Image (cartoon, helix red, strand yellow):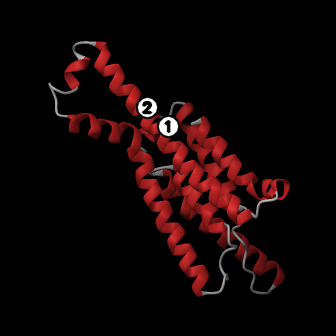
Amino acid sequence: MLIVFVILILGLLTPRLSGRLGIPVENLAKYVFYGAIILIFGIQAYWSWQQYSLWKYAGPPASYLLPPHQPISYFYLYAYMQFFNKFVISCFASFIFLLAANILNHRFHRRFFEKEEPYFGALSIFMLGQPLWLFYLPVVLAGGLVVSAYKSYLTHKTYRFSLYYLWMGSAIVLFLAFISLSYYGLIWFNEILK
């Protein structure tokens, strides 16, 4: 959980860090996004290997969960469901979001997003995991709609609010809300999200 929070904070700080590092924001956002995918799946693979080693050397009854007593597909399914499932689904969703956002942006001449914004959204979707990203997208879009409506009402002109800072900020708030609800004993909330 800590690594997810750190990567979300890194995503939030990407625009500031790009100036200090001398790297364009779009490139740094890409590096953070793809680096997060590699890091998370590397951690999941390490945990799977540790689980396999634990079962293998623990002796009976744990060793009966591995070949030759069980097919290796049993362990693969176990590792997928325990470690990879949450992030495989959100990785797939983040790539769909990234592709759709880049196509829309290209088609409408960057009217919707800055160049790096799709990477912020994709990073947030990936890091929040399944099913939190399903809550995340409506929160971001509703936040943008509310601010746009409020600004339009005040100025009596059509106003389009940029979601630039909402992408990572909303992800951090949603992640912290999830941790708080899980920590303070709302077990039903944890069970819904499994």
87 sits to left or right of 32: left
Where in the figure is residue 22, as x and y percent of width and height?
Answer: 82, 58
Q: Residue furthest top?
A: 59
Q: Which residue is mark 2?
A: 47
Determine contact: label 1, label 2, CB under 8 Å: yes
Image quadrant of residue 179?
top right
Q: Quadrant of the N terminus?
A: top right
Where in the figure is residue 70, as x and y percent of width and height?
Answer: 16, 29
Where in the figure is residue 156, as x and y percent of width and height?
Answer: 80, 86
- Going by the numbered disc 1, the residue's amino acid type is Ile
Is residue 181 or residue 26 the one in the foreground?
26
- Going by the numbered disc 2, the residue's amino acid type is Trp
Q: Residue at x 22, y 35 (%)?
A: 72
Q: Is residue 12 above or below residue 99?
A: above
Res 43 label: 1
Q: Residue at x 29, y 36 (%)?
A: 78
Where in the figure is residue 136, as x and y percent of width and height?
Answer: 55, 58
Q: Residue at x 35, y 22 (%)?
A: 53
Q: Quadrant of the C terminus?
A: top left
Helix, strand or loop at mark 2:
helix
